[in-house]
Image (cartoon, rainbow, N blue to C red):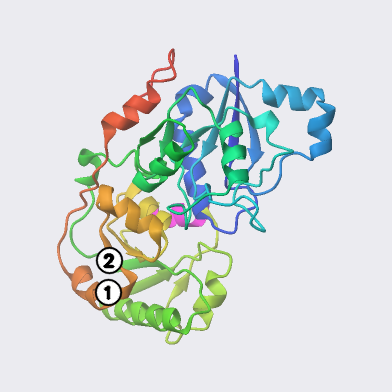
Amino acid sequence: MDNILLLDTSITTFNKGDDIIMECTRKELAPLLENAFEITLPTHVSPFHWYQVWRNSLYVQRIASCDYKFVGGSNILIPNLLTHFPQWNINLFNYQPMKGCILVGVGAGAGAEGKMSKYTRMVYQRLLNHDFFHSARDERSKQYIERLGLKAINTGCVTMWMLTPEFCATIPTTKADRVVFTLTASTNPQRKAKHQQMIDILLRNYHEVWFWPQGIDDLDHFRHLNDTESIRILAANKQAYDDFLTQNDTDYVGTRLHGGVYAMRHGRRAIIIAIDERARSINEKNHLNCIDFDHLDDLEEMITSEFKTKIVMDFDSIRQWKSQFEGYKFDI
């Protein structure tokens, strides 16, 4: 039996979208994981103290000797690991047991197009696998990985690997009577005004409006908006959102990318409002039903119009990435 290390981006997260990513990562890696002993380590908090690594205990040795080491998605690659709190909490003194990591649908964060620090380049080059192709979430993330001298394939986000043309054809094309929406908390007064505009549009166009607080500050932000008395609030966990999407005929509208993708995975019509490079980069290749945050004036027309969900995924690239792991049968 193989031992497989899974670097979990949902531990100590402030964004329940990471729970969605890890659920999807496990589903896509199931042919490997079901026949292995799975060991999980966090990415957001340091898995080892330098002293533990220096002592090279049996525990550290077992982690280091895992047959495969996968990193599950998220916006985890950055240009400077010396930032005050990197998404992947690794450094020159604790990375050694995790050497040989393989990225699964991983993205590069803001500033990835710029110059990365020499220290960051050194740590990533020592940490990440040089033999396997890494799975990148989008083209800019693929280019970031290749700038490290490593091999990468643009597979798209792992949360979208199941969105085949056949599946997308089952998603409704017309507006439901109910909608669930998300917001991304912000202290920017202009963003708050845009969120208010979005809520006003939803209240005009749906009989039932629900809010899912995907991020840690989203509910507090929502409570500072106006005319929200009739809006129902879901519990701030993935299971509550999963149950709602499973049990209700609903649309999704919101700024949370993975909230929207998860809705589509449940066969629900989704409109994703792009607020950062993640949704914009993914939309360039994968064609989300997406409008830009700066163009909210177009939202009402899109809600009331009829449109198909036509996610474009490069399934050949996904198969190519999976085919590296010989001896395991992968289905798509």
Do callouts 1 and 2 mark residues in contact (Cβ within 8 Å)? Answer: yes
Is residue 332 at least partly visible in the picture?
no
Residue most extreme to the left: 306
Residue most extreme to the bottom: 226
**Residue drawn where x is 55% and y is 62% of the image:** 236
Looking at the image, which is closer to me, 328 or 213?
A: 328
**Residue drawn where x is 57% and y is 76% of the image:** 220
Please state which amino acid type lies under the numbered disc 2: Ile
Q: Secondary structure at mark 1?
A: helix
Q: Looking at the figure, which quarter contains the N terminus?
A: top right
Q: Secondary structure at mark 2?
A: strand
Lateral position of residue 212 relative to residue 249, left or right? right
**Residue drawn where x is 43% and y is 14% of the image:** 326
Dominant secondary structure, magenta = helix
Q: Which residue is tagged 1?
A: 295
Alpha carbons under labels 1 and 2: distance apart: 7 Å
Lateral position of residue 16 relative to residue 321, left or right? right
Q: Which residue is tagged 2?
A: 291
Lateral position of residue 316 relative to residue 20, left or right? left
Query: In the picture shown, does residue 183 fall above or below 123?
Result: below
- Image coordinates of residue 82 in percent, x first then y, are 65, 53
- Image coordinates of residue 25 in percent, x first then y, are 47, 37
